Amino acid sequence: MFPQTVISRSGVAAIRAAALMALACAGFPLIAAGQTYDLVINNGRVMDPETMYDDIANVGVKDGRIAAITKEKITGKETIDDTGTAVLKK
């Protein structure tokens, strides 16, 4: 059996903030208000091994590149509901 680790709510918030900061520093805008994307992937488990980001989020793709990763609602010309599956950034 694996040992259990208990993380406080403030610890979880700090981890999330660090992951979002890492994404922003890696050049990923976390949201662009009012922007329409070519493709939106909603509610997918977004994983980025480089930044250790792992959360349910929405991904906005513009001109073939990831333009936003956000928990906010975003719109696009095409939308995919990715609930229950994963989006892996290479």
Image (cartoon, helix red, strand yellow):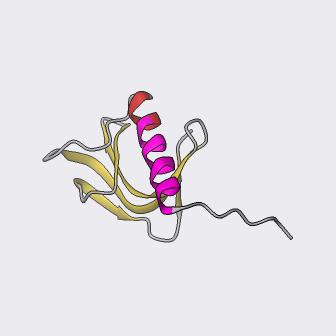
Residue appearing at x 59%, y 35% in the figure: 50
- Residue 12 % position (x, y): 51, 56
State which quarter of the image contains the N terminus.
bottom right
> Taking 90 as reference, is 32 left or right?
left
| Count of all numbered marks drawn on residues in the image | 0
Residue 42 in the image, given as x and y percentages of width and height: 36, 61
The answer to whether residue 7 is seen in the rendering is yes
In the image shown, does 10 or 43 lie closer to the viewer?
10
Residue 23 versus residue 80 in the image, above or below: above
Q: Is residue 25 left or right of residue 39?
A: right
Horizontal relation, residue 81 to residue 33: left or right: right
- Image-quadrant location for residue 79: bottom left
Asked if residue 40 lies left or right of residue 21, the reply is left
Q: Classify 3 as above or below 11.
A: below
Q: Nearer the viewer, residue 9 or 28?
A: 9
Residue at left 40%, top 57%? 57
User: Magenta residues: mostly which secondary structure?
Assistant: helix
Query: Which residue is at 42% across, 37% downward?
Result: 21
Residue 72 x, y percent position in the rendering: 27, 57
Start and end of the magenta stretch?
9-21
Q: What residue is rendered at 45% in x and 54% in y?
A: 13
Residue 86 falls in image quadrant: bottom right
Residue 46 seen anywhere in this rendered image of the structure: no
Query: Which of the two residues, 5 or 79, is positioned nearer the viewer here?
Result: 5
Residue 25 lies in the magenta stretch:
no
Residue 20 in the magenta stretch? The answer is yes
Q: Which residue occupies the extreme right position in the image?
A: 1
| 59 relative to 49, above or below | below
Q: Where is residue 43 in the image (x, y as percent from the top left)?
A: 40, 64
Q: Quadrant of the C terminus?
A: top right
